[in-house]
Amino acid sequence: AQSVTQLGSHVSVSEGALVLLRCNYSSSVPPYLFWYVQYPNQGLQLLLKYTSAATLVKGINGFEAEFKKSETSFHLTKPSAHMSDAAEYFCAVSDANQGGKLIFGQGTELSVKP
Amino acid sequence: DAGVTQSPTHLIKTRGQQVTLRCSPKSGHDTVSWYQQALGQGPQFIFQYYEEEERQRGNFPDRFSGHQFPNYSSELNVNALLLGDSALYLCASSPRDDPTYNEQFFGPGTRLTVL
């Protein structure tokens, strides 16, 4: 069975600092991996996805993530945090055999201090 | 181009009642999935509809049922509501030309409160 673990339910950074949100996955087949962002009282917006192409994936708003098979990780990073990045971030896993069923982590709330 | 739309935005029901939530997929999408997001949790997969049939189902009781119409829109029905059904219900649609249906576009959700 597939699963996702997000380390740290809350992460706080200063504006301009590096953002690092951690995600580890478990999958018996090559996974597809996703990061979604959720702003208060809104749905989920796709930041980026890994689907077995390049291991370093660039997404919207300056975010990127690196797929590391040996570490079963897909951590999300951004070099310089903006106040507008404050939101809830979810890592999710799927595979081609699941036909699109996404398994989500518990989420990490990112706070950005001025 | 309108994205995924859901109605209503908010809903308050009492225990034992029945509720219907609605979703219109993004233009060009034919697959609709429903997720339940309890407060402080990640979304959990309820089921997925394709060609008007339930294709996959998560670990949810039969009280949760759905339907997809010929125009690809979908409904989620929940019978005999429990307090624990209070959550944000998210609809997601997938593009017709994605054979793995892995890129899902989410709607804003319906906030259901059961009293």
Image (cartoon, helix red, strand yellow):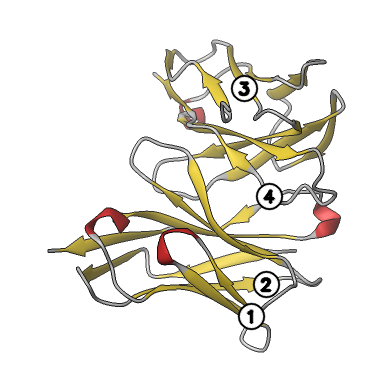
Foreground of the two, B97 or B36: B97
Which residue is under mark 4? Answer: B103
Amino acid type of the residue tagged 1 in the rendering: Thr
Mark 2 neighbour class, 10 Å CA radius: few under 14, some 14 to 19, many 20 or more: some
What kind of element bears circle 2?
strand
Task: Say whether residue A96 is left or right of residue A27.
Answer: right
- Contact between marks 3 and 1 (CB within 8 A): the answer is no
Which residue is under mark 1? Answer: A72
x and y, in percent, of residue A78 in the image:
38, 72
What kind of element bears circle 3?
strand
Which residue is under mark 2? Answer: A26
- Contact between marks 2 and 1 (CB within 8 A): the answer is yes
Which residue is under mark 3? Answer: B23
Amino acid type of the residue tagged 2 in the rendering: Ser
Farthest residue to the front: give it: B1
x and y, in percent, of residue A45 in the image:
50, 47
Cα distance in 3D space between marks 3 and 2 = 31 Å
- The numbered mark 3 sits on a residue in which chain? B
- The residue mark sitting in front, 3 or 2, is 3
Q: Residue at x 68, y 49 (%)?
A: B103
Task: Say whether residue B7 is left or right of residue B53.
Answer: left
- The numbered mark 4 sits on a residue in which chain? B
Amino acid type of the residue tagged 3 in the rendering: Cys
What kind of element bears circle 1?
loop
Same chain? Circles 2 and 1: yes
Residue A42 seen in this snapshot: yes
Same chain? Circles 4 and 1: no
